[in-house]
Image: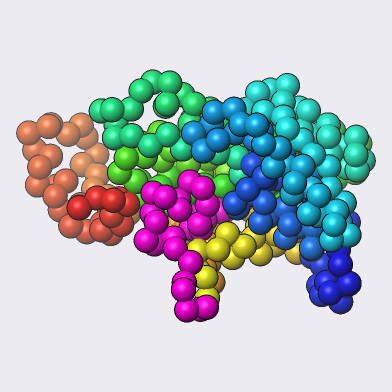
């Protein structure tokens, strides 16, 4: 990158990083941050509108041009990551241009918000497809490559960083399709971390709170930039340092975790775990469950509220 970054630490030096949905918002911020950190970047973006409709722009090429203008190396992918052939092509782009793949950042997504009773089946399918399937397929093809490398005695220091959401971890009114997909991504992260570790692959997820096309209208007041020149807590660039760290060799030993990132705050998110319990050592009768269930709920931690619930 440019001379102003020459003396700064470059934690991704020499790595090849694929970022999906990198044409705008968080993905763009991640791609630029990885390039500044010394990585060669495959910028993937299908160039669709906020609701997933086909668009005329080519934002991936624009971000790649930004990286090259600052002295970095970038390749462009416009593959559909929720299609098996597209996901395979994404991995192939990294190998063809740079000869290797070290880090996959799954970030692509869009919104079609509706209350559940108004949510069309097509809107459910489209959002689950791009978010959840669009995480699974790139991981599948990247991990197949890393497995081949490991079997050949070239065990990689590979990293996958997935993108979940507070909506997926806590729920969000009006976002049932998005919340379900993002919850699925969190669970998929745990499974992938357990399965891919034998190949030298670490898998983590980030639940970002930041200003993007998907949030700046739905949560306009919370996402607005400060007018007094103070710290812009909702700038997407605030999330990227954590993503770069998790995507670098420096994060050795960190896997199977979900982190929330907002402004300057990083939180380890603690998912489903067993808390209060009772055991009769025999089959319960439904008629006798009210008292023990209420006692258990009194002993268990109070769940955090669903976003948007009153």
- Number of numbered callouts drawn: 0
- In this view, the residue in front, 310 or 154, is 310
Percent coordinates x, y for residue 18 in the rendering: 75, 44
* Residue 188 coordinates in the image, percent (x, y): 55, 38
Residue occupying image coordinates x 60% and y 40% = 108
Q: Where in the figure is residue 174, as x and y percent of width and height?
A: 32, 40
Left or right side of 59 for 155: right
**Coloring scheme used:** rainbow
Q: Is residue 208 left or right of residue 249?
A: left
Residue 205 is inside the magenta segment: yes
Front residue of 101 and 94: 94
Q: Is residue 300 above or below residue 146?
A: below
- Identify the image quadrant of the N terminus: bottom right
Residue 178: in magenta span: no
Q: Magenta region: which residues?
A: 202-230
Residue at image x 55%, y 35%? Answer: 49
**Looking at the image, can residue 247 be seen?**
no
- Quick one: 140 or 193, which is closer to the camera? 140
Q: Is residue 117 left or right of residue 124?
A: left
Quarter of the rendering containing residue 104: top right
**Above or below — where is 49 with respect to 273?**
above
Please tell me which residue is depicted at 79% across the width and 39% down the height of the picture: 76
Query: Residue 232: in sight, yes or no?
Result: yes
Q: Is residue 193 or residue 99 the one in the foreground? A: 99
What is the quadrant of residue 302 in the picture? bottom left
Outermost residue toward the left?
287
x%, y% of residue 271?
A: 43, 51
Residue depicted at 38% across the width and 37% down the height? 113
């Amino acid at each position: 990158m440019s001379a102003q970054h020459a003396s700064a630490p470059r934690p991704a030096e020499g790595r090849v990083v694929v970022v999906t949905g990198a044409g705008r918002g968080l993905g763009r911020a991640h791609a630029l941050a990885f390039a500044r950190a010394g990585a060669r970047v495959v910028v993937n973006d299908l160039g669709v509108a906020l609701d997933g409709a086909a668009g005329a722009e080519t934002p991936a090429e624009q971000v790649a041009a930004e990286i090259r203008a600052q002295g970095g190396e970038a390749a462009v992918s416009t593959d559909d990551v929720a299609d098996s052939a597209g996901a395979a092509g994404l991995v192939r782009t990294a190998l063809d241009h740079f000869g290797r793949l070290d880090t996959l950042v799954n970030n692509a997504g869009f919104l079609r918000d509706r209350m559940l009773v108004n949510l069309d089946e097509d809107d459910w399918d489209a959002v689950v497809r791009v978010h959840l399937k669009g995480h699974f397929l790139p991981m599948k093809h990247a991990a197949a490559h890393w497995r081949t490398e490991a079997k050949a005695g070239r065990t990689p220091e590979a990293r996958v960083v997935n993108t979940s959401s507070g909506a997926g971890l806590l729920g969000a009114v009006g976002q049932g399709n998005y919340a379900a997909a993002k919850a699925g991504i969190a669970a998929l992260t745990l499974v992938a971390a357990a399965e891919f570790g034998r190949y030298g692959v670490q898998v983590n997820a980030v639940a970002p709170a930041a200003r993007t096309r998907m949030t700046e209208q739905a949560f306009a007041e919370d996402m607005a930039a400060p007018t007094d020149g103070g710290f812009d807590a909702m700038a997407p660039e605030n999330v990227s340092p954590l993503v770069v760290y998790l995507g670098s060799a420096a994060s050795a030993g960190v896997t199977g975790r979900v982190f929330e990132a907002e402004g300057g705050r990083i939180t380890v998110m603690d998912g489903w775990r067993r808390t209060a319990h009772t055991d009769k050592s025999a089959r319960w009768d439904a008629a006798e469950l009210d008292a023990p269930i209420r006692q258990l709920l009194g002993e268990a931690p109070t769940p955090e509220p669903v976003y948007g619930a009153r």
